[in-house]
Image (cartoon, rainbow, N blue to C red):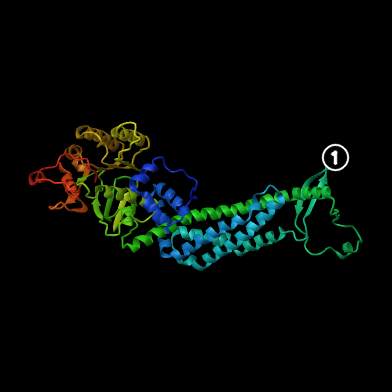
C-alpha cells in the first residue's frame, strides 16, 4: 500500500540525506524557528518537516499536487490529526511485543500474531475514517489515498486476515508432516492447516485406517521434550517468518503514513500560530525556471513574525525577468530581513507549503543557497575574507543553472575597492551560469557598477529612511546611494554627531542591516 500524500508516483524517502549546504541554509534563514513552530514539541514532525522543506520540488506540477493536498488538510484538520494520532498509536502498540524479534520460531510466531492482531484493530479504525470522510476530500492525493484504503482494506481482506490469525493460534495443536531421510532423521517438515471438524466416528472408535497418530512425552523426559520442541520449530519456521514479514509490511505502511501525515500536521500547527498573530498566508504560484520570475505583495519573514509580538512589515516586489536584485540602503532598515523572507518563501513554495504574504508568484529553482556575513570567530585560523572565500568556493561546486543564491554583505571583510571587485567577478560568473542572485550590500562601488553596466537586467531595491532617520522597514525601487546612514545607528546607541557631520554623507560603514 502507498500513501501518495507527498508524491503522486512514489513514497517519501524518510532516510534521505540532507543537502550538503543545509547547515548554512538553516543558520542564515533561521529555519529552526519555523521548524519549531511546525513541530509544536513533536521531534518526529520536526525531523520530517526539515527534510521535506530542504528537499525542494523542482516541478511546478508536483508542487501544485502537494498544495491541493494541503488545502484539503486545512479544510479538514480534525480528520488529519485523528489519522496521525491513530498511526502514532499503532506504532506505539508494537513496543509491547518484544518476542517478535526472537530467534525462536515459537516466539517469533507468537509475537507476530499478537502484532498483527493489534494492527488489524488500527486498520479497521483507518478504514472507518475513510468510510466516514472520504467524500469530503477533493484533491487528487487524498482521493487516491482513500481509494486505496477502501480497495485494499475491504471486508474480504479483514475476513481473510481474521481467519488466518485464528488458525495461527493453533488451539488444537500444530499439524505437520515430514519424511524420513536415509539415516531416519526427519526432513521436509510441512505445517498443515488444522483439520476442520472432528475426526470421523470410525477413527474415534479405532475402526479402520487412521489419518494421524499421536504420542505422549513423559513430563520428566527433558531430552524428549527438547526434541519435540525442535521438531515443532522446524515445522513452524516458514509460517513464523511469513507472519513476521506480514507484520513488518503493515508496520512499514504505518511508518510511511506517519511520515507523510507529519508534514501536513506541521503545516496545520504553523497555520494555527500564524492565524493567532493575524498574519496573511497564501498558496504561492510556482512557474517554470525560465524566465526568472518573482512577484509578491506583503511578503514577511516568517521566522521573525513568529518571534515578534508586534506587527511585521511586509514587502511588495516585482522582479520578473531580472536575474539580479541588488538591495542597498539604510542600516537596520530591513534588508537582511527581506533577504531571509525571499529564501524562506522560496523553500516553502517548493515543498508545497503556503507562504506568509498576501500573494506570491515565483519561478522554481534547482536549489536555494546562502552566503551571509559571519560574526567574528575566535577559533578561526585565518582572516574573515579567507573564510568567506572558502565558503564561496565550496558553494560554487554545488551550484547549477537556475539556482537561487542569497548574498548578505558578502566580501565586506576587506576594503571597498577589493570587496567590490571580488563581488563583481562572482556575480558575473554566476549570471553567466544562469544563476539568480539577490545581493544585499553596503558597498556603493559594487552596486553602482551594475547600475552603470546592466541596469536593464538588474532590479535595485533600497531600504527606506525617513527625513528624521526613522526606518519603515519597507523596500522601494531606487538607485543605490553612497551612504548606508550608519550615523543613525551611532546616534541610537548613544553617540554624538554635530550638525555638520550629520548632514554629510557617512563614510563607508561596515555595520550590517
Q: What x and y, as percent, mark residue 428?
A: 26, 35
Q: Residues within 10 Å of mark 1 (few under 14, many from 20)?
A: few
The residue carrying mark 1 is 183
Along the horizontal axis of the image, is 55 left or right of 232? left
Along the horizontal axis of the image, is 351 left or right of 92? left
Q: Is residue 148 visible?
A: no
Q: Quadrant of residue 170?
A: bottom right
Q: Is residue 277 visible?
A: yes
Mark 1: which secondary structure? Answer: loop
Residue 453 vertical position relative to residue 72 in the rendered view, above or below: above
Q: Residue furthest bottom?
A: 132
Q: Quadrant of residue 275?
A: bottom left
Q: Quadrant of residue 198?
A: bottom right
Along the horizontal axis of the image, is 12 left or right of 345? right
Please tell me how many numbered marks the rendered image carries.
1
Residue 225 vertical position relative to residue 358 in the rendered view, above or below: above
* Residue sitting at x 63%, y 62%: 158
Q: Residue furthest left?
A: 500
Image quadrant holding the N terminus, namely bottom right
Q: What x and y, as percent, mark residue 130?
A: 52, 64
Q: Residue furthest right?
A: 207
Q: What x and y, as percent, mark residue 492?
A: 18, 50
* Residue sitting at x 24%, y 50%: 334
Foreground: 63 or 502?
Answer: 502
Foreground: 78 or 311?
Answer: 311
* Residue sitting at x 48%, y 61%: 143
Foreground: 23 or 57?
Answer: 23
Amino acid at each position: 500500500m502507498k500513501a501518495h500524500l507527498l508524491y503522486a508516483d512514489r513514497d517519501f524517502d524518510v532516510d534521505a540525506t540532507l543537502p550538503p549546504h543545509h547547515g548554512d541554509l538553516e543558520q542564515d534563514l533561521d529555519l529552526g524557528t519555523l521548524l519549531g513552530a511546525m513541530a509544536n514539541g513533536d521531534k518526529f514532525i520536526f525531523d520530517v518537516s526539515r527534510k521535506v522543506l530542504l528537499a525542494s520540488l523542482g516541478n511546478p506540477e508536483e508542487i501544485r499536487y502537494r498544495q491541493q493536498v494541503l488545502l484539503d488538510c486545512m479544510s479538514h484538520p480534525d480528520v488529519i490529526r485523528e489519522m496521525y494520532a491513530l498511526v502514532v498509536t499503532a506504532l506505539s502498540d508494537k513496543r509491547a511485543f518484544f518476542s517478535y524479534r526472537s530467534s525462536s520460531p515459537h516466539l517469533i510466531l507468537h509475537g507476530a500474531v499478537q502484532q498483527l492482531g493489534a494492527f488489524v484493530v488500527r486498520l479497521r479504525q483507518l478504514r472507518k475514517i475513510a468510510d466516514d470522510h472520504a467524500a469530503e476530500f477533493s484533491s487528487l492525493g487524498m482521493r487516491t489515498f482513500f481509494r486505496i484504503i477502501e480497495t485494499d482494506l475491504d471486508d474480504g481482506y479483514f475476513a481473510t486476515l481474521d481467519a488466518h490469525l485464528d488458525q495461527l493460534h493453533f488451539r488444537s495443536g500444530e499439524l505437520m508432516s515430514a519424511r524420513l531421510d536415509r539415516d531416519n532423521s526427519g526432513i521436509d517438515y510441512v505445517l498443515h492447516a488444522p483439520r476442520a471438524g472432528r475426526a470421523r466416528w470410525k477413527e474415534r472408535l479405532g475402526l479402520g485406517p487412521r489419518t494421524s497418530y499421536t504420542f505422549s512425552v513423559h513430563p520428566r523426559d527433558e531430552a524428549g521434550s527438547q526434541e519435540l520442541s525442535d521438531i515443532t520449530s522446524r515445522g513452524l519456521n516458514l509460517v513464523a517468518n511469513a507472519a513476521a514479514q506480514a507484520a513488518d509490511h503493515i508496520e512499514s505502511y504505518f511508518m510511511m503514513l506517519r511520515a507523510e501525515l507529519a508534514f501536513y500536521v506541521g503545516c496545520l500547527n504553523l497555520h494555527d500560530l500564524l492565524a493567532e498573530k493575524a498574519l496573511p498566508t497564501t498558496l504561492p504560484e510556482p512557474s517554470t525556471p525560465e524566465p526568472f520570475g518573482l512577484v509578491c505583495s506583503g511578503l514577511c519573514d516568517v521566522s521573525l513574525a513568529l518571534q515578534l509580538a508586534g506587527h511585521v512589515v511586509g514587502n511588495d516586489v516585482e522582479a520578473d525577468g531580472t536575474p539580479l536584485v541588488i538591495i542597498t540602503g539604510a542600516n537596520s532598515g530591513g534588508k537582511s530581513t527581506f533577504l531571509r523572507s525571499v529564501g524562506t518563501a522560496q523553500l516553502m513554495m517548493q515543498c508545497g507549503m503556503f507562504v506568509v504574504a498576501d500573494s506570491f508568484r515565483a519561478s522554481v529553482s534547482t536549489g536555494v543557497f546562502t552566503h551571509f556575513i559571519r560574526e567574528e570567530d575566535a577559533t578561526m585560523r585565518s582572516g574573515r575574507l579567507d573564510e568567506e572565500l572558502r565558503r564561496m568556493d565550496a558553494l560554487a561546486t554545488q551550484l547549477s543553472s537556475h539556482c537561487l543564491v542569497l548574498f548578505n554583505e558578502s566580501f565586506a571583510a576587506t576594503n571597498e575597492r577589493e570587496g567590490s571587485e571580488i563581488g563583481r567577478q562572482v556575480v558575473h560568473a554566476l549570471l553567466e551560469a544562469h544563476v539568480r542572485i539577490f545581493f544585499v550590500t553596503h558597498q556603493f562601488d559594487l552596486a553602482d557598477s551594475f547600475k552603470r553596466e546592466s541596469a536593464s537586467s538588474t532590479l535595485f531595491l533600497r531600504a527606506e529612511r525617513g527625513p528624521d532617520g526613522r526606518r519603515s522597514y519597507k523596500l522601494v525601487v531606487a538607485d543605490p546611494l553612497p551612504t548606508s546612514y550608519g550615523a543613525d545607528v551611532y546616534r541610537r546607541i548613544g553617540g554624538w554627531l554635530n550638525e555638520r557631520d550629520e548632514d554629510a554623507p557617512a563614510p563607508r560603514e561596515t555595520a550590517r542591516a
